[in-house]
Image (tube, rainbow, N blue to C red):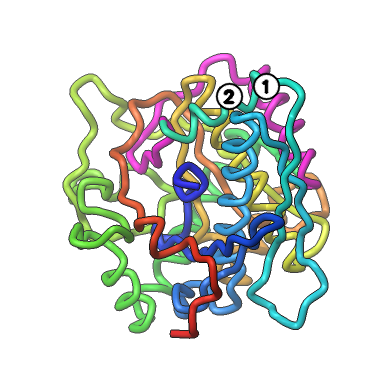
Amino acid sequence: MALACRAPSLHNSQPWRWLMGESGLQLFSDPDRLLPATDAFGRQMVISCGAALNHLEYAFESKLWCPVIDRLPRSSDRELLATIGFSQAPTRSDFAVRMARAIEQRRTERLPLKAPPGWEETVELLARIAAESAVELEDLGERSGHTLEEASRRMTGLRHTDVAYQAELRWWSGQGLFPDGVPEEALPSDREQHSVGVAREFPAGNASVPVGGPSEDRSAILLLSTPADSRLDWLRSGEALSAVLLACTDRGLATCPVTHLTERSATRTMLRELSAGECLPQVLIRVGAGTGGPTTPRRPLSEVLFRERPAPG
C-alpha cells in the first residue's frame, strides 16, 4: 500500500482513500483534497487516483497477487472509483517486479532535461503500454515546441490575475512542513524558473541545474489523450500516466507530468490541434535524460487506509 501511495498527484495533494474489506479494497477520491481553483471539475483528482490504482496493481503483482479491478462500479457514491479483489498468481511477473522497483526510484524532475537516448524504440514501447489502458500516446515532436511554449505563456498570463489560483498554488508549494505538497527543494530556483518553456510557474524554490547539466530543455513531449472526457477516461488516463512514468524510470529516463495546459479550454484546444488524432488531451509528459528530482513526502498510511469509511471532512 505504501508503494501505491507513491503515485504522482496534482501538487502532491494525494487525493485518495483506500478502504479495506474482507473481499479486497475500495479506492475513493478524497473531496477534501480537491483543488477547486486549479481543478474545478475534479478531473486531475481522478487522474491522480488512477495513477495510484496502477501503482497498486504493480506493487501487488510483484508480490504474487493478481488484482481484479472493477472500475467505477455501479454505486450512488461518486467518490468510489474502483473495487479491487485479489487472486494468487501462479508465477511472479518480472515486468511487475521492475515496475515496483521503479515506483521507489521515480521522481518528478522540473529542471531542464537532455534529449532522451534511444527514443524511437522507447516511444513505441510507451505507446503500447498506454494503449493497454485505452489511452492514446503521441510524441508531439520538435514541431510542437513553439506552440506549447505559447500555450504555456497564455496560461501563465491567465493565472497571474487569478487570486484564488495563486493562493492555492502558494498553499501547496514550498512549505516543507507537511507530508504533502511540493517541497521547496523540488521547485526550480529564480534562475531556473523559465528554463523549461512548457512548465507551470511555481513560487521559486532552490532546485538548480547541476554542474554540467543542460542549460536548455531538450526533453521529448508526450501527449496522453482519450476518446471521451468521462470519469472513466480520467481514471484510465491516470493509470496510463503511471505506467508510462514507471516504464521511463525503468529505462533510466527522467520525467515530469505537465497538466496546467489542460486546465483551461483555450490551451486544451491548442493541444488538440497539435495532435494528429481526434482524442481529448488529458496529460503531457516531459521525458529526457536527467538526474531525477528529490524525493517528495507522502502522508502516513493511517491517513489514507481505513477499515471503516471516514466521516466527511
Looking at the rendered structure, the kind of residue marked 1 is Arg
Q: Nearer the viewer, residue 158 or 290?
A: 290
Give the side of residue 91 with respect to residue 219, left or right: right
> Are discs 1 and 2 less than 8 Å apart at CB?
yes
Give the side of residue 67 with respect to residue 4, left or right: right
Q: Quadrant of the C terminus?
A: bottom left
According to the picture, the residue beneath numbered tag 2 turns out to be 97
Label 2, residues with CA under 10 Å away: few <14, some 14-19, many ≥20: some
Write down the quadrant of residue 248 in the picture.
top right
> Residue 80: x percent and y percent?
67, 71
Give the side of residue 297 with respect to residue 307, left or right: left
Looking at the rendered structure, the kind of residue marked 2 is Val
Q: Nearer the viewer, residue 149 or 204?
A: 204
Q: Disc count in the image?
A: 2
Q: Nearer the viewer, mark 1 or mark 2?
A: 1
Residue at 58% of width from left, 59% of height from top? Answer: 49
Kind of element beneath mark 2: helix
Residue at 53% of width from left, 66% of height from top? Answer: 307
Q: Nearer the viewer, residue 120 or 144?
A: 120
Label 1, residues with CA under 10 Å away: few <14, some 14-19, many ≥20: some
Q: Earlier in the sequence, mark 1 or mark 2?
A: 1
Residue 127 in the magenta stretch? The answer is: yes
Q: Which residues are magenta?
A: 105-134
Residue 311 in the magenta stretch? The answer is: no
Whether residue 184 can be seen here: yes
According to the picture, the residue beneath numbered tag 1 turns out to be 92
Residue at 60% of width from left, 52% of height from top? Answer: 283
Give the side of residue 294 with respect to residue 197, left or right: left
> Residue 184: x percent and y percent?
21, 53
> Residue 77: x percent and y percent?
70, 80
Residue at 21% of width from left, 42% of height from top? Answer: 207
